[in-house]
Amino acid sequence: MISLVKELQIKYQKLQEYIRQTGSVAVAFSGGVDSTFLLRVAHDVLGDRAVAVTARSCSFPAREWKAAQDFCEQNGIRHVVCESEELEIEGFRRNPENRCYLCKRELFEKIWAIAKDQGLHSVMEGSNLDDNGDYRPGLQAVEELGVLSPLRYAQLSKAEIRELSRELGLPTWDKPSFACLASRFVYGETITEDKLSMVDRAEQLLLDLGFRQVRVRIHGTMARIEVEPSEFEKLLAEDVRETVYSQLKSFGFSYVTMDLLGYRTGSMNETLKFC
């Protein structure tokens, strides 16, 4: 890590020491940029006393599940599956503004049970410093259940985590950001298995077409596509546009639109009064 600037080295060392003091940990692992970095550091520091726990549900695409599995297998990290079906949580399907709280509360209760069964002393999750600036009701559940947030403790931003991940040779250092498929729904719109599948298939299509960072937001049966502004021209090319339109129609969407502002995290939060 000698190529890092001193300030980032200090943060990295602070993170290592914080994890070391836990003694053992279950890491909530989605396979994304943040949780992959956290798991790698925890495993480097604690060895077999760091265990990855991945929740499997209909809001978690198969491609993400496979990536999480592959990373643990390739790095010799013990990996436990947590069956967590959000749609069975009371009130979740109605998609209230505190949807993420309901989900995280149920998830971390299950991860704590796994941790205790495995003889582990703590549970960690991968929120970073940037998450403090958005509407994140799931962090309330994190605090209530005593789940640790080492990346926020070390005051690491997303950009710094990517830089550290690159230094560590992690394949996720430049991986596009991802959030569960339930985040594609307008608050108050009922979340169903069929609509989650529509969103998943639509986003997979865009990824297969070579788009890097995508979201397909669902409004009733209308799709609102978000891609990076640098890829607008590609999406509007006649052959791509026609393919996307026809395929999304076949998935069950009535209308297919493009968001003129482009991809951004938490765009469904923009209508909330406190955002």
Image: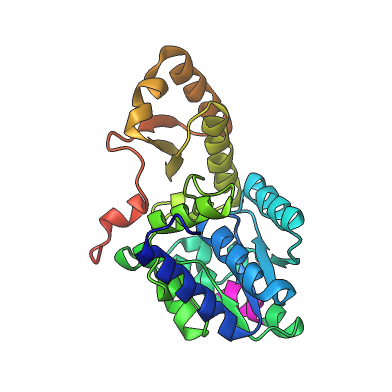
**Can residue 160 be seen in this snapshot?**
yes
User: Chief secondary structure of the magenta span?
Assistant: helix
Instruction: List x then y, in percent, for residue 85.
Output: 64, 63
Q: Is 76 drawn above or below residue 141 in the view shown? A: above
The answer to which of 270 and 146 lies nearer the viewer is: 146
Q: Is 240 drawn above or below residue 22 in the view shown? A: above
The answer to which of 198 and 118 lies nearer the viewer is: 118
Q: Quadrant of the C terminus?
A: bottom left
Q: Which residues are magenta?
A: 106-112
Is 164 left or right of 86, judged from the image as shown? left
**Residue drawn at point x = 68 percent, y = 67 percent:** 52
Q: Is 216 drawn above or below residue 131 in the view shown? A: above
**Residue drawn at point x = 36 percent, y = 54 percent:** 266
**Residue drawn at point x = 38 percent, y = 28 percent:** 231
Which residue reaches farthest top?
238
- What is the quadrant of residue 260 in the picture? top left
Instruction: List x then y, in percent, for residue 187.
Output: 38, 57
Which residue reaches farthest front?
2
Colour treatment of the image: rainbow
Q: Is 245 drawn above or below residue 227 in the view shown? A: above
Q: Is residue 107 magenta?
A: yes
Numbered disc total:
0
Instruction: List x then y, in percent, for residue 173.
Output: 51, 49
**Can residue 101 be seen in this snapshot?**
no
**Residue drawn at point x = 64 percent, y = 78 percent:** 25
Q: Is residue 79 magenta?
A: no
The answer to which of 125 and 10 lies nearer the viewer is: 10
The answer to which of 73 and 43 lies nearer the viewer is: 43
- What is the quadrant of residue 107 in the picture? bottom right
